[in-house]
Image (spheres, grey):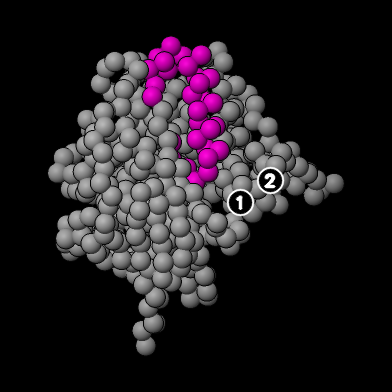
Amino acid sequence: MLAELPRQIEVRYSPGMVHVSGAVSQRVRITMQSMLQGMFPSVSDRLLDLVEIAAGVYAIDRIYRRSPTKSNEAGARILPICFYISEPLYWAQPTITNQVAELLHFLTGDLWLLSFAQGERAPRARQSVIDFAWGRQAGHVALYSGGLDSAAGLANELLGGHRDFILLTAGHQASIRRRAMRQLSALKRLLPNAASLTHLAFVVNLQNPARMRIQEMTQRSRGFLFCAAAAMVATCCGVPAVHVYENGHGAFNLPLGTGALSGGFATKGAHPTFLRMMSDLVSETLSSSVNFVLPFADFTKAEMVAKLNEVPGLAAWLASSCSCVHSSWRERGIDHCGHCPACIERHQSFFSAGMQDQTPYSRQLWGRPDPLGNDYLRAYLDNALRWLEQDLRVLRRFRQHCGMSDIPSGDRNRLAQLCHRHAQEVVATYGNLHHSSATRDAA
């Protein structure tokens, strides 16, 4: 017997606001609409539709909590949604609807049943184009989160001679925007090329939301919203590519266990297949080419950091980046916890790069008496050791992940080499913990 479908969710818009009703109800303020409408003279209705669809998807993903069961360990959701937008006939074409639904399924592991209806949009005044301070056309558009990858990626590109960047910060907290602004202001004092940066930001705020512990924490669809907004900025500025600052190993994101290969277990917001799907969708929507690229697809996070090791002041500047999972969950008093997966890899990156880790961790795991009591660190180190041993189970998982995430065969050898270098970094950083634990057990 087929399970009964959930009640339909409806998504409507008013200037700067998303209204979700039906199976779940929520109002969401999005500052990007007013920002973009105030800075760019000609944003097409279809492009605004894309951003509004992405904002609605993000809102639903965040408030419609997963409910894992024995038969559905990932808590995969069935989400029937109707979007009220300007050009429903375009989006309702089967090829376009399927393209969006498949992209969202790849990101979240959920089944998105999408429909579109005619919505109303307030008239938009024509305003002058954004005034870039350096007086030249924008050369690059990049997403900038304020994390270690985005900080290291931007610094590397500036040192490589690139300039005239427009950076877009997208976040679900106003603090993300403020932190990014502080970082970029400090970078302009360190690197001459940074003077040509222009920073844009938008924040997505739930109005009177439920407590964080009641919201969905995975929020796998954030990459769709971020890339949709970046596509708008790139299109308005005449830039054909958006740079995504994620290291290649992190973008590929090989799960630590076979059970996480499918569903919404793994983060895929910078995965090369998602970026290709997003490039195809945006290019189809705009009838012009916009590509999302990974400039550091061939680097580990540590290798990105190591390229900055000799530049005075950059080690302290990189420490101002924020990687911690718990800080993004707004846990009071936590900047970097020192024991979440993001903090574990952050420390490894500094250590492997030969750079002092100046991050103020509140409770660093690797300094505790029994660090391998942490399930993630134990699995993380075990997987690295098994990779270096060429364990057949790890190699099989690698091949399965490549197949299930549609990685071209020509890229698989490069990714295998990247995983091998990353495993060497993990063992060099944390391999001594096995010996320390064994010594304590013997004593």
Q: Position of residue 392 (x, y in %)?
A: 45, 54
Q: Position of residue 16 (x, y in %)?
A: 39, 47
- Please give the name of the residue rendered at 47% of the width and 36% of the height, measured from the top-left corner: 145
Magenta-drawn stretch contains 194: yes
Label at residue 332 = 2
- Mark 1 crowdedness (10 Å alpha carbons): few <14, some 14-19, many ≥20: some
Extreme bottom residue here? 1
Q: Are marks 1 and 2 in contact (CB under 8 Å)?
A: no
- The type of residue carrying mark 2 is Arg
Q: Secondary structure at mark 1?
A: helix
- Please give the name of the residue rendered at 63% of the width and 27% of the height, measured from the top-left corner: 357
**From the viewer's perspective, is residue 178 above or below residue 44?**
above
What secondary structure characterizes most of the magenta part?
Answer: helix
Q: For residue 164, which quarter of the picture? A: top left
- Please give the name of the residue rendered at 52% of the width and 60% of the height, measured from the top-left corner: 216
335 lies left or right of 59: right
**Of callouts 1 and 2, the N-terminal one:** 2
Point out the image quarter for the N terminus.
Answer: bottom left
Q: For residue 292, which quarter of the picture? A: top left
Label at residue 376 = 1
- The type of residue carrying mark 1 is Tyr
Q: For residue 117, which quarter of the picture? A: bottom left
Q: For the magenta stretch, what is the residue range?
A: 169-198
